């Protein structure tokens, strides 16, 4: 008997990569926001603000890319702000 394995299409792989990156960035955003509660130095707070803005920009770019690809995934629908 011939055993064929299912191979993902390149489009499916790209979508999975987007989802994975989106989840990682969303987790990082939560970590950053938790750090705000612990930050007691102005320079640390500034660094967290810059990092939070960078992560939010990357999430927005991934969301836009997913829409262009036609990926209708709930991960891209939830708010990240």
Image (spheres, rainbow, N blue to C red):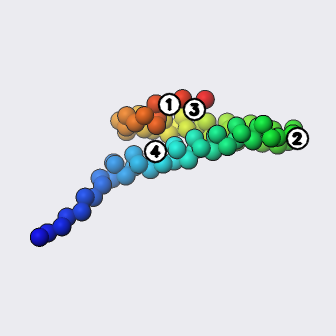
For label 3, the residue is 80
For label 1, the residue is 78
Q: Is residue 64 visible?
A: no
Q: In the rendered structure, which disc, 2 or 3, sits on the residue that comes first in sequence?
A: 2
For label 2, the residue is 41
The residue depicted at 43 percent of the width and 34 percent of the height is: 74
For label 4, the residue is 19
The residue depicted at 60 percent of the width and 36 percent of the height is: 57
Few, some or many C-alpha atoms within 10 Å of disc 4 (few <14, some 14-19, many ≥20)? many
The residue depicted at 41 percent of the width and 48 percent of the height is: 16
Few, some or many C-alpha atoms within 10 Å of disc 2 (few <14, some 14-19, many ≥20)? few
50 sits left or right of 44 in the view: left
SS for callout 2? loop
The residue depicted at 55 percent of the width and 38 percent of the height is: 59
Q: In the rendered structure, which disc, 2 or 1, sits on the residue that comes first in sequence?
A: 2
Q: CA distance from mark 1 to mark 4?
A: 12 Å
Q: Are marks 3 and 1 in contact (CB under 8 Å)?
A: yes
Q: CA distance from mark 2 to mark 3?
A: 26 Å
Q: CA distance from mark 4 to mark 3?
A: 14 Å
Few, some or many C-alpha atoms within 10 Å of disc 3 (few <14, some 14-19, many ≥20)? some
Which corner quadrant holds the C terminus?
top right
Q: CA distance from mark 2 to mark 4?
A: 34 Å
SS for callout 3? loop
Q: In the rendered structure, which disc, 1 or 4, sits on the residue that comes first in sequence?
A: 4
11 sits left or right of 22 in the view: left
């Amino acid at each position: 008997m011939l055993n064929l394995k299912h191979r993902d299409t390149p489009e499916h792989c790209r979508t999975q990569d987007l989802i994975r990156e989106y989840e990682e960035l969303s987790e990082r955003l939560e970590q950053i926001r938790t750090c705000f509660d612990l930050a007691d130095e102005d320079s640390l707070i500034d660094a967290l603000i810059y990092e939070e803005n960078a992560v939010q920009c990357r999430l927005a770019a991934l969301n836009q890319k997913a829409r262009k690809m036609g990926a209708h995934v709930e991960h891209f629908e939830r708010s990240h702000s």
